[in-house]
Amino acid sequence: MNPEDYFRNGKVNVWKEDFAVVKSKRSYPDAFANIIDKNETTVIIDQSKFNNKDAIEIEKDWKILTFDMILPFGLIGFMAKVSQVLADEKISIFAISAYSTDHILVKEKDLSKAIKKLESLGCIIEKK
């Protein structure tokens, strides 16, 4: 399996909402994701739906880009390539993997540069 095969004409959906990545006192059932480990609870949520009183630390103004494709578990190097092309442009990412696909968050200020770099890999960008 070659990552380039997935980039070529692979769809990437850009979510319209602005998201916050929060180190939170609790999880939120309507969040995009709750990541609960032994040290902390991280909530990724539409920033208009988060109650700031629950925040320990908060990073706002993130956009979610979803790779709208089924990525097999045996695929090697997909996120490495995404990370590298965005790092080359000094774009920080927050990566999340789901069972079948991957998501990245980029700061809103970096969104147009990130889109151009993903398009250069062959991705088709759709704004939702």
Image (cartoon, helix red, strand yellow):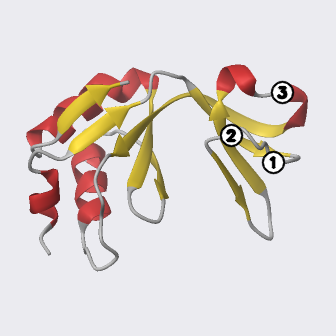
Q: What secondary structure is marked by label 2? A: loop
Say which of 38 and 70 sits in front. 70
Asked whether the residues under the numbered discs 1 and 3 touch, taking CB atoms below 8 Å apart as contact, a structural biologist would say: no
Left-right relation of 102 to 11: right
Q: Is residue 83 above or below residue 2?
A: above
Provide residue 128's location: percent of width, then percent of height: 38, 24
Say which of 62 and 73 sits in front. 73
Please name the residue that numbered disc 2 is placed on: 31
Q: Is residue 11 above or below residue 98?
A: above
Q: Residue at x 72, y 35 (%)?
A: 58
**Is the residue marked by circle 2 packed among few (<14), some (14-19), or many (20+) residues within 10 Å?**
some
Q: What secondary structure is marked by label 1? A: loop
Mark 1 / mark 3, whichever is N-terminal? 1
**Is the residue marked by circle 3 packed among few (<14), some (14-19), or many (20+) residues within 10 Å?**
few
Please name the residue that numbered disc 3 is placed on: 51
Q: Alpha-carbon distance for marks 1 and 3?
A: 11 Å
Asked whether the residues under the numbered discs 1 and 2 touch, taking CB atoms below 8 Å apart as contact, a structural biologist would say: yes
Per the rendering, the mark at residue 109 is: none
Quadrant assignment for the N terminus: bottom left
Q: What secondary structure is marked by label 3? A: loop
Residue type, numbered disc 3: Asn
Left-right relation of 40 to 64: right
Left-right relation of 58 to 86: right
Please name the residue that numbered disc 1 is placed on: 27
Q: Alpha-carbon distance for marks 3 and 2?
A: 12 Å
Residue type, numbered disc 1: Ser
Of the two numbered discs 3 and 2 in the rendering, the one whose residue sits closer to the viewer: 2
Quarter occupied by residue 15: top left
Left-right relation of 5 to 92: left
Provide residue 19's location: percent of width, then percent of height: 58, 30
